[in-house]
Amino acid sequence: MSDKIFNYLNNFLNKNLSKLKWLNRLVAIICLYLLFQIFLNNDFSLSWSQNLLIFPFILLIGYMFQSINWSLIISHKLKKEMIMSWFLSLIGKYFPFKIGVPLLRLTKDIDTDKADTKKYFLGVIYEVCYQMIAGTIIVIFYLITKFYNFSFVFALVSFLIILLIASKLTSSQKPLLLLTSSLSYVFYILGIYLFLSKLGYTTELDIAVAYIGFSIVSLLFIGSPAGIGIREYLFITFFQTQGVLENSEYLQIAVLIRIIFVFSDFIGYTIFKIIELTNK
């Protein structure tokens, strides 16, 4: 069933890619404009400390699980080359339409006559779908546990254990792919949670899960490099209606989290670029 869904998405993108590009351009530009207006209408200041640089390394653990997910999708096993290509493609998502992501992952096959570009583009679709499924499940778990006053950590750990057991009992890779994607989001949420705790916020878990939720939505908009503008606008607009903090505080949170993720991308790319150059 899932293979049919992924193949349908692939065919849909092939037939409608040009239209989707223009639609995503329009949405990205509108969100950036509205975000700019929010900045102008609020007394915004940015507080930064070098102590905050520890948190990208927590996010890098999440990146490692996502790179493992990519290796399993493409090679059906752990391969160092696939993990390296994932990290080396981190800068690709800042290209328009994120076209750099699949292209930069063709590191091993691109110099041969057997380069299977279709496999890599389809692999990116698979990866994004598993990201959206895993992230959505975690956000739903959080909302349910919050509504019923139940332990979110217990529910999340139980879910991960079930996926681990399922991956051991079945020959299908789907539970393992969902597990690795879920673990990546666990560390994203943990990194944001600890980051906001360091800044002194008391609703850090609510904010962290909400940011992840809007990150998942931004995955749909390939016209915005790394979801810039869309993710922040949705995040700030949502919290404007909550009245927990001042608008300017959410502006600062959105910008700082974005900086942390960009810095994480830079660190991950740099580390594996050095490894690549060292191995030559």
Image (cartoon, rainbow, N blue to C red):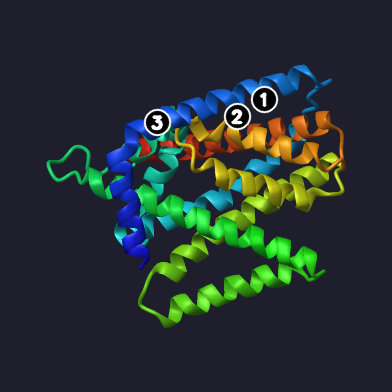
**Residue 2 point in image, percent of width and height:** 37, 64
Classify residue 189 as left or right of residue 124. Answer: right
Q: Residue at x 65, y 71 (%)?
A: 157
Q: Residue furthest top?
A: 40
Classify residue 142 as left or right of residue 120. Answer: right
Specify the amino acid type for callout 3.
Lys
Mark 1 neighbour class, 10 Å CA radius: few under 14, some 14 to 19, many 20 or more: many
> How far apart in space, not on screen, are marks 2 and 3 (Cα)?
16 Å
The image quarter containing residue 101 is: top left
Mark 3 neighbour class, 10 Å CA radius: few under 14, some 14 to 19, many 20 or more: some
- Residue 37 visible somewhere in the drawing: yes
Mark 2 neighbour class, 10 Å CA radius: few under 14, some 14 to 19, many 20 or more: many
Q: Nearer the viewer, residue 192 or 268?
A: 192
Q: Nearer the viewer, residue 155 or 218?
A: 218
Q: Which residue is mark 3?
A: 21
In the picture, the disc for residue 121 is none
**Residue 179 point in image, percent of width and height:** 51, 65
- Residue 106 visible somewhere in the drawing: no
Tell me the element at label 2. Answer: loop
Q: Earlier in the sequence, mark 1 or mark 3?
A: 3
> How far apart in space, not on screen, are marks 1 and 3 (Cα)?
21 Å
Q: Which residue is mark 2?
A: 229
In the picture, the disc for residue 35 is 1
